Amino acid sequence: MRSQADAPGITSFTDDQLVRVARLFASDASLATHLDDLPADAGRRRVSLASTPHLEMWAITWPLGSSSGWHDHGVASGAFVVVHGALLEEVALPTGEVVTTVVTADEHRSLPPGLIHRTSAFGDSPALTVHAYSPSLAGARTFEPEQLGPTA
Ligand SMILES: [Fe+2]
């Protein structure tokens, strides 16, 4: 029997559960208002939708030209859903290669612990995304491009 200290969907989340909870929050039609007043030259803007030690939910707006920079998520697993627009995701592999994916509206990506990536607005309109992370993002790190490369 599973202990209450590790209750899937309550205190821990599988990859599929993170995608589903991100899609649940992304289904809130009022999220689109976050795109209404974006200054043209602003960077990303993060809005906390929910936060516990076990789960963080964020809405992020991505003006044209904005980027997250290279980062990981500490020990957290994550998922994001594109609500509007598109993101370009670049994943830095341990081999030093970078794999690039375009994630468009209603698509999602799962983010395993240890993943190092950079996401950027893509296309000709601002993007809106919803992100779920478990546990919290404490311990997440940022990287300069020269810090990336083969690790073994
Ligand atoms: Fe990320």
Image (cartoon, rainbow, N blue to C red):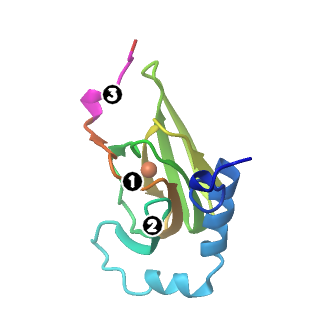
Left or right, 19 with reference to 100: right
x then y, percent, for residue 22: 61, 65
Q: For residue 52, which numbered disc appears in the image? A: 2
Left or right, 96 with reference to 4: left
x then y, percent, for residue 45: 35, 71
- The numbered mark, 3 or 1, whose residue comes first in the sequence reads 1
The amino acid on which the numbered mark 2 sits, given as a three-letter code, is Thr
x then y, percent, for residue 36: 44, 86
Left or right, 41 with reference to 8: left
Q: Residues within 10 Å of mark 3 (few under 14, many from 20)?
A: some
Q: Is residue 53 magenta?
A: no
Q: Is residue 133 above or below residue 106?
A: above
- The numbered mark, 2 or 1, whose residue comes first in the sequence reads 2
Q: For residue 90, which numbered disc appears in the image? A: none
Magenta part of the protein: which range?
145-151
Rendered residue at 69%/62% (across/down): 20
